[in-house]
Amino acid sequence: MCPPGCLEMVRRRLNRRDFFKGSGIALAAGGASLALPASRPRAAEPRSFSSVVDLTHTLVEDFPTYFGDQQLSIETLTTFDPDGLNMKRWTLHEHTGTHLDAPLHFSADGASADEIPVEDLVVPLAVVDIAARAADDPDAQLTPDDIAGWEAEHGPLPEACCVALHSGWDRHVATPMFRNADEDGGMHFPGFHPETTDMLASERSVVGIAVDTLSLDYGASADFAVHNEWLPSGRWGLECVASLSSLPAAGATIIVGGPKIKGATGGPSRIFALVA
């Protein structure tokens, strides 16, 4: 919140800005007339990619959650009329929406979100597609055979990469099918098989994994085997990723804009992919 007098100061500044903007007045300096630019020009920068894909779901208060409870609430603190600025307070669970799982999430002393090296958050992306299988079997898991099939077509997994499971589950995000809970409360959606993450950790150079579902483990998991093995190894995971169907299987780069909050076990993140 603003300290005492803050809102009044904002109003004065807004009134002054609107005066200059509406009047078209030029500022004089040493006899020269300096016109106020409509917008600041942006310098052209070299690009080594053709497009950017947003892999982030828009987070809303009723976004589906693993345990089924609401994990985000939003409170309005000020509004532009009459306060001169808009400001809200968020109350949220770290593991809500498209979010990062840091090593600390499932370990006693693993790296928190703010301690993950930034070079491990901008890495090559391998997208492994099991959507056809998942359409027939919601309990489908990404297996070592799926990795072998990907490598047979695209070559070895890139060094220090992220492997993303594309199950097509993001299309269900606004429906009960995203959790797909049965009458006993058990959930059914795809995830990584523990044998796969064991292989990626011990036999490949992989720093992160991503899923388009609510959990790195498949929904019917009773022991969080993937979480318990993968995260304590010092690697990260992403859950509720969107739009993997828009990406090539190989060649993209993922950018993980994770929270830099001291001690965070994870948190809602803005995720991008740069496509060559």
Image (cartoon, grey):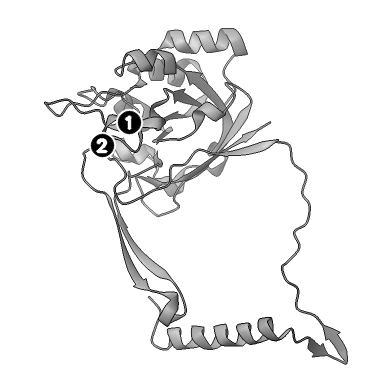
Whole-number angstrom distance, CA of label 1 to CA of label 2: 8 Å
Q: Quadrant of the C terminus?
A: top right
Left or right: 91 in relation to 38: left
Q: Is residue 201 above or below residue 72?
A: above
| Image coords of residue 102 (percent x, y) | 39, 40
Residue depicted at x 29% and y 40%: 64
Q: Residue furthest left?
A: 184
Residue depicted at x 73% and y 66%: 40
Tell me the quarter of the picture where residue 28 sits: bottom right
Pointer 2 local density, CA inside 10 Å: few below 14, some 14–19, many at least 20: some
Residue carrying label 2 = 66
Left or right: 24 in relation to 88: right
Q: Is residue 195 above or below residue 230?
A: above
Pointer 1 local density, CA inside 10 Å: few below 14, some 14–19, many at least 20: many
Q: Is residue 242 above or below residue 78?
A: above
| Residue 161 makes an appearance in the image | no
Q: Which mark is residue 96?
A: none
Please tell me which residue lies in front, 31 or 63.
63
Q: Secondary structure at mark 1?
A: loop
| Residue 85 makes an appearance in the image | yes
Residue depicted at x 75% and y 87%: 25
Q: Earlier in the sequence, mark 1 or mark 2?
A: 2
Q: Amino acid at mark 1?
A: Ser
| CB within 8 Å, label 1 to label 2 | yes
Q: Residue furthest bottom?
A: 31
Q: Amino acid at mark 2?
A: Tyr
| Image coords of residue 253 (percent x, y) | 60, 33
Q: Is residue 88 above or below residue 104?
A: below
Residue carrying label 1 = 215
Please tell me which residue lies in front, 131 or 4.
131
